[in-house]
Amino acid sequence: MSSATSWSPAASSVGFLPPDNGSFTWNGQLDQLPLSFNISDSQYRGEIQIDGSCWVNSFIHGSNGHSYYVAAQVMDYASQLPGALPAYRASLLDVTEPSLYRNYIRHDPEGSGLWTSEGDFRARYDGFGMEATGEDPLQGIHIYSSIAGIDFDLTFNFTSPVLLNAALGSYWVGGALGWQWSLPRGATEGSLTIDGEKIDVVSEKSFSWYDRQWGSLQASINWVMVHFEESDWLDISVMSVWYWTDPVNGPKEFATIRSSRNSRDSVVPISVAASTTNVWTSPETGITYPQEWLLVLDDIEMVVKSPRPDQVIETPPGTIPPSQFSGYVDIIAKKAGHASVKGFGAVDRVTIAEG
């Protein structure tokens, strides 16, 4: 299913940030942590096959002066969710002029999978691909699309220190372990093509976030990714926020934060509230999606807003994965006595199972 919609929202005033230029493995110090998994194994099928989700969010400054949000994802949860088909999807938003928005999702009934027979990460479909760029599974990823007016060819490298969600990259969900690690700001190059116009990526003003998740899943996924510009008071560079009601041990609300001062990571409780008044109801499915969220961390309030309401990947009823809100957001951080700080990011919100 695909969509290309016209809208007249206000343009975003947020400029994107430069990529990181660092070591993905913290110069080898990652090996000192007692992780419950091997990161390389999640990007290469050896003795263990790890499927799940591979999700790219590229924040692109184009050679035409516009900023773009490009998302691409491949998912294979067939072993966990009855009836689930491998799926791939992409979306494109012109952040400078948000009237341009396109998306699509396709399912793979053949179950081609994410890996070659040799174990390399290579998810290739008709008009879409996501694959490792070299023999080292942690070197970089190439993504491309030529479906439904979403045309891009992007490559990003693992130049950002890994962000281990919930401190060690794993957490309990529904009585079992789920895993998640992120590459917050990988150096990105390539191009987009919009209505026949080729737009080159301005690499020094662009980056890609790569999110790798597998294992036990929340019945209702609510996730916020945050990037902030530099500030003299806000000690947050990037942040990954989760909130859900766990059927085994109750509500969960936490943030994995990277300090803007020393680049150290921490995990803290956070309060998350989705608006019940600023909402949008899909005319196709009747599902209502919030368009605004409030994150509260101690005395800091962060207002998260979608620049347009219909950043929704629609799927037919009963399809796994189901319809979901998945899109770009603008963010403002506020604290009494201080100037507001601008940020941006993405929100993913979907109900997989009731209850």
Image: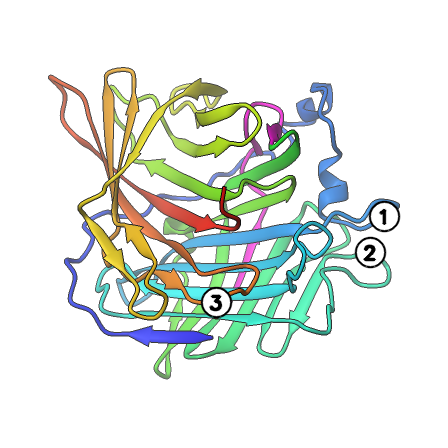
Q: Is residue 143 left or right of residue 58?
A: right
* Callout 1 touching callout 2 (CB < 8 Å): yes
For mark 2, give the secondary structure: loop
In the rendering, which numbered label is found on residue 137? none
The residue at which mark 3 appears reads as 317
Q: Is residue 324 magenta?
A: no
For mark 1, give the secondary structure: loop
* Three-letter amino acid code of the residue under disc 1: Gly
Identified at 33% across, 75% down, the residue is: 4
Looking at the picture, tell me which residue is in the foreground, 223 or 283. Answer: 283
Up/down of 80 relative to 96, above or below: above
The residue at which mark 2 appears reads as 119
The residue at which mark 1 appears reads as 46
Q: Is residue 35 left or right of residue 71?
A: right
Identified at 44% across, 61% down, the residue is: 323
Can you name the residue that lies furthest to the bottom here? 196
The mark that comes first in sequence, 1 or 2, is: 1
